Amino acid sequence: MINQILLGLSTGAIYSLVALGLVMIYKITGVVNFAFGNMGMFFVYIAYWFISMNVNFWIGIIFSLILAGVMGYFLEKFGLRSIRHLSHGSMLIVTFGVLMVLEGLAVQIWGTDYKTFPEIIKGRPYVFRGDFGILVLRKQDVLIFALLIMVSILIFFLMKYTKFGIAIRAVSENEEISSYMGINVGKIFSFSWIFGTVVATGVGILVAPKTFVSPSMLLFYQLEGFTAAVLGGFESFTGAIFGGLLLGVLENLVGKYISNDLKSTFSLLLIIVVLLLFPNGIFGMKKRERV
């Protein structure tokens, strides 16, 4: 049981990272980024291309993350901001368009064959023995936990103790009043998409050794991250973190003790149940507005 929970937490940490990327964009701009997975996938291919050209592994990863951030910036500034005055639905359609364009480009450039990607950390796993039995923890899992903790701490200090974080909170509450107060709303919007695209690419790099590099490599993780965000409340960073961890554990227990084929079905069922019973998510808070 402890091993299953530990494995679930490892998978859930990935879900939490995806949820954080989705929540950052939604909280600030009000748009659910359906292109999240394919944006990450495309730049994992870029990293793969750099590495296959015998570029240093870390340089290839850093370049791909930088290019991901640049794409997020240009997509928001020149693709979404100009139609923001229309409706959120129009921006949602743009994300679907980006999803299809990036998938088509990936297929045309690199084909549909699965490609191997090296692990960031290699070596024998950590093995712990005791009265509880034997626990096995891969070094890659340790890295994922460490990244989740680091990103969570950075978001906490950014939102709590910096002027930029206060500006983010203000824009997420009311962008019009924020602009009247002198806040550069466009800068905040761009930041959310840069953050989301870089997180998507980072997640892709973390899971690529397991899933291999392919045009559909992150679609499953995007669905799970969306479920985690709904579970935690789609505007809550804390909810995104704990929602992802909880989802990972629950899925792993379902797969182990009921049926592995029901894991994806369980996620979809969980979305329906949470939306029916907890419209604001388990960790979400109801908004109160003075009339």
Image: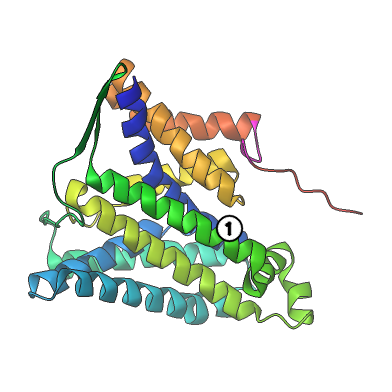
For this view, does 219 lie left or right of residue 238?
left
Above or below — where is 158 with respect to 34?
Answer: below
Above or below — where is 178 with respect to 93?
Answer: below
Q: Is residue 282 magenta?
A: yes
For this view, does 173 lie left or right of residue 56?
right
Query: Of helix, strand and loop, which one carries label 1?
Result: helix
Write the start and end of the magenta stretch as one range: 278-283
Give the residue pinned by disc 1. 156
Residue 78: x and y, percent? 49, 82
Residue 9: x and y, percent? 38, 36
For this view, does 124 lie left or right of residue 92?
left
Residue 92: x and y, percent? 51, 62
- Image quarter where the C terminus lies is bottom right
The residue sitting at 79% across, 73% down in the picture is: 177
Q: Is residue 289 magenta?
A: no
Q: Nearer the viewer, residue 64 or 154?
A: 154
**Quarter of the view holding residue 11:** top left
Majority secondary structure in the magenta region: loop
The residue sitting at 63% across, 68% down in the picture is: 165
